[in-house]
Image (spheres, grey):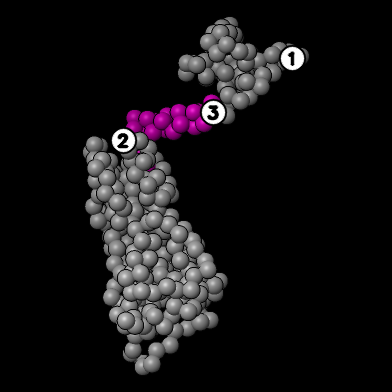
Amino acid sequence: MRLRQIEVFRAVMLTGTVSEAARLLHVSQPVVTRVLQHAEATLGFRLFDRVKGRLQATPEASALYGDVERLYGEIERVRRVSESLRHKGAGRLRVAATPSLASPLLVPAVRAFCARHPETQVQVLTHHTDEIVQGLLANQIDLGFAFSPPRHEAISSEPVAGGQMLLAVPRGEPLSSRGRRADVPMHRLVERPFIAYDDNSSLGLLVRQTLARNALEPRSTLEVQTYSLALALVDAGLGLTLLDQYTALGANPERVSLHEVKPALSFEIQLLRASHRGSSSLADDMREQFAAAAREVAAALPQRLEAPAVSFEHAPK
């Protein structure tokens, strides 16, 4: 079907008559009738049956209509962007982040960005890292933010923020050390319920590799794929876990305590772009707002950390 045929088909679906469809499209009734006839000839099946003076959609037309509406959503988005460009010189930015970065960092970054660019159309997406990469390659996303993503020859990346993993512990099961300033060896905690990660993300691998390197096998009966869910389970008192600092700082301090891990389990947050497409001033500004949001959140970290720290250095041989 040509775009004009799709437009007429949609108008008839919405109005139910040729005359109302013609009025909606600001054309004559013969034009609507002729375009419909051509569309049916192209498709090889009828789109409408006339029932008591109205056009009733055939089952084939009903099946087609859902895709037509989705197409019109995209067309409307293009129309809004083109109008914005024509009248105000603004544009569109499509930005994605992994679920753990969306609420603590992307939301405040988008808020600051929109205050600076009120006429820009911003599409905000939440995807896992591999989905962000595919979206960039397919030109469905302009830039993305993810934890230490794997290298890809067609994707350029640059660090935009950093952080460390923290141990999140339910308030009902506090940590205790032998001395006021002493660290708690991680091997003393392996008998406690531990919330593990069942994913191949960089942070999930970091946690598993650190535990394996120290010959630690926590008693894990719960596995999750997102850090926000891991935090929710800690909040519910179902176990302790290792979390990135940005997710961890969203914890309710009355229900969850946060502890430093030694040596630090550090990570980077990377800005991802498609290598074959140039950057834009809008994308550059979103990067700056995201970095600023990360700095603001990180500044609250020292006040939220509690003693004792947890150490991987004293695991038994």
| Residue at image point 49% right, 61% down | 224
Q: Which residue is mark 3?
A: 67
Query: Range of the magenta residues?
Result: 67-94
The residue that appears at 29% across and 73% down in the rendered structure is 264
Quick one: which residue is furthest to the right in this view? Answer: 52
Q: What type of secondary structure mainly makes up the magenta span? A: helix
Label 2 element class:
loop
Rendered location of residue 12, percent (x, y): 61, 19
**Residue type marked 2:** Gly
Marks 3 & 1, CB-CB < 8 Å contact? no
Q: Could you tell me if residue 283 is visible in this image?
A: no
- Disc number for residue 83: none
> Label 3 crowding class (10 Å Cα cut-off): few <14, some 14-19, many 20+?
few
Whether residue 263 sits left or right of residue 96 in the image: it is left
Q: Residue 126, relative to residue 46: is it above or below?
A: below
State the SS at label 1: strand
Which residue occupies the foreground of this view, 195 or 60? 195
Q: Residues within 10 Å of mark 1 (few under 14, many from 20)?
A: few
- Read off the residue under disc 1: 51
**Image quarter in which the C terminus is found:** bottom left
Q: Quadrant of residue 259?
A: bottom left
Q: Is residue 316 above or below residue 287?
A: below
Residue at which label 2 appears: 89
Q: Is residue 37 visible?
A: yes
